[in-house]
Image (cartoon, grey):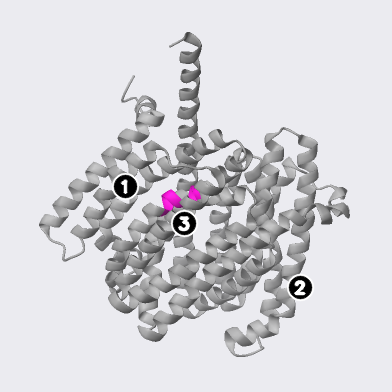
Amino acid sequence: MSSESAENINIEEKGAEKQYRDILKYTGLFGGVQGLNMAAGIIRNKLTALILGTYGYGFISIYNSASALINNSTNLGISFSSVKDLSRIWHDEDEAAARDYVDVIRFWALLASLLGIIVCFLMAGYLSELSFGTAERINDFRILAFVVGLTTFSATELSILKAVRRISDVARISLYSAVSSIFIVIPVYYLLREDGIVPGLLLLAIGVAMITAYYTFRLYPLRRSIFDGSNLRKGIPLVKLGLSFIIAGVFGSGAEYLIRAYMSNVGGVDEVGLYNAGYAISVTYMGMIFVAMENDYFPKLSTLCDKVKERNSLMNSQIEVALWLISPMIAGLLLFMPVILPLLYSGKFLPAQDMILWTTMYMFFKALILPVAYLTLAKGDSIAYMILELIYDLFFVGISVLCYSVWGLKGLGISLSVAGFFDLILIGAFAYRRYGFVYSRRIVITVAVQLPFIIAMILLFQYERNIVSWIAGSLITAVIVSLSAYFLNKRTDIISKIMIRTGLKK
């Protein structure tokens, strides 16, 4: 081998190592921030429950659901679609073009914010009737209209920071917003009780908007050119992709609603509650490690989506890190589930264990699916994205109804895993045929090593737990954690660096 070839290989290896380190760094950063956000949310929820009780808590849930529904229907998806093009422009180091495109984003965000305010204001009476059976709360929903507009503004401004790789600022905004929510809404609830719910939500929306604007306006100050009429035409592709994202989200929401409605009619409301708790623990909480994909990975992928070799390398690195991180989390959840469920909810939710057992495999598949699914959005293939989501959602509803009718709540966990495997085949085959993406040999080895251990733990805890299953489960968990630590350290040397920083190694 020539010295030049050896040098090129060495450079590639160093580049790959940096890629792994960056992925692990930002996954850890946003995973940690999400953990702190969750802790702040728990504190806020506990204090709110003490002050307002279940009655007031119900009001908050209804108002939040209504504002989220209007926001998701009117924000045009700009906060997601804007990342793709702005990240490319920023990567090309064209500062003037980046500032001009920020004007386009803000112009359409202003239109979306106004649309949300107008729609919520006009529907205030209907929302009041639908939510409370009376029009007496119409003014509450009129005030809530401004919460909808401010939410669209904050999300769009945050997307600008994501696109230009100000990741630390994104993390700070997320953390400050979560912590400030305690100090903003709790005093209002304490002073005004139920009458302070809507003012509290409005003050919180204003606070989040101000925190976000502090960072984005320093980077890209507001300019008069935002009102340039040409921004209307320039933003049409932006809105086209955004609307596709919204429509796909409607498919997903519709699928979840149909499943819950079917459960409510067949099994009762209690079954829906168990399903929600099981889904939250196994999907929402463990999904913390995937937050970094939207904030860090998607902007990177958008800049590399036309460079096949570099793009595929990034995708495989992201998948590998996600697999080595999610596997210990799955093992820990499977092992300590009888402790975690009563801790987060109560002993009444223990019947959700069987569902959670099988849902964990869905999260393993999701680590393989999500980085690949983002490629369709990064390429701007909006129609393909919608079709893929529709196919998956139709399959998901069908398999969920079938499995629930046969196995009950456990069947929904099985259906999630089966749907996850179906999505893996669907997304993988499409990405291979359309974009030439192939899972690397390392990914195949990682799956071959980790998945059998996870399946073994699921089968081990499928029946009544005893001393044998606890010992066996603990040993398997130790093996999974050790393997993850070994391979992550091999790719990034993270353990050695931690030991040096803590003085355990020189």
* First in sequence: mark 3 vs mark 2: 2
Is residue 476 toward the left or the right of residue 443 in the image? left
Q: Pointer 2: what residue?
A: 118
Verify whether residue 388 appears in magenta: no
Residue drawn at (32%, 53%), measured in percent from left and top?
A: 330
* Label 3 CA crowd tier, 10 Å (few <14, some 14–19, many 20+): some
Give the image quarter of residue 468. Answer: bottom left
Q: Pointer 1: what residue?
A: 328
User: What kind of residue is marked 1?
Assistant: Pro
What secondary structure is found at the residue carrying circle 1?
helix
* Label 1 CA crowd tier, 10 Å (few <14, some 14–19, many 20+): many
The reply to whether the C-beta atoms of the residues labelled 2 and 1 are less than 8 Å apart is no
Image quarter in which the C terminus is found:
top left
What secondary structure is found at the residue carrying circle 2?
helix
Give the image quarter of residue 336. Answer: bottom left
Specify start and end residues of the magenta stretch as a single range: 366-372
Residue drawn at (21%, 64%), measured in percent from left and top?
A: 462
Marks 3, 1: nearer the viewer: 3
Q: Residue furthest bottom?
A: 134
Is residue 505 toward the left or the right of residue 4 in the image? left
25 or 430: which is nearer to us? Answer: 430
Marks 2, 1: nearer the viewer: 1
Q: CA distance from mark 2 to mark 1?
A: 47 Å
**Residue 257: x percent and y percent?**
49, 75
* First in sequence: mark 2 vs mark 1: 2
The reply to whether the C-beta atoms of the residues labelled 3 and 1 are less than 8 Å apart is no
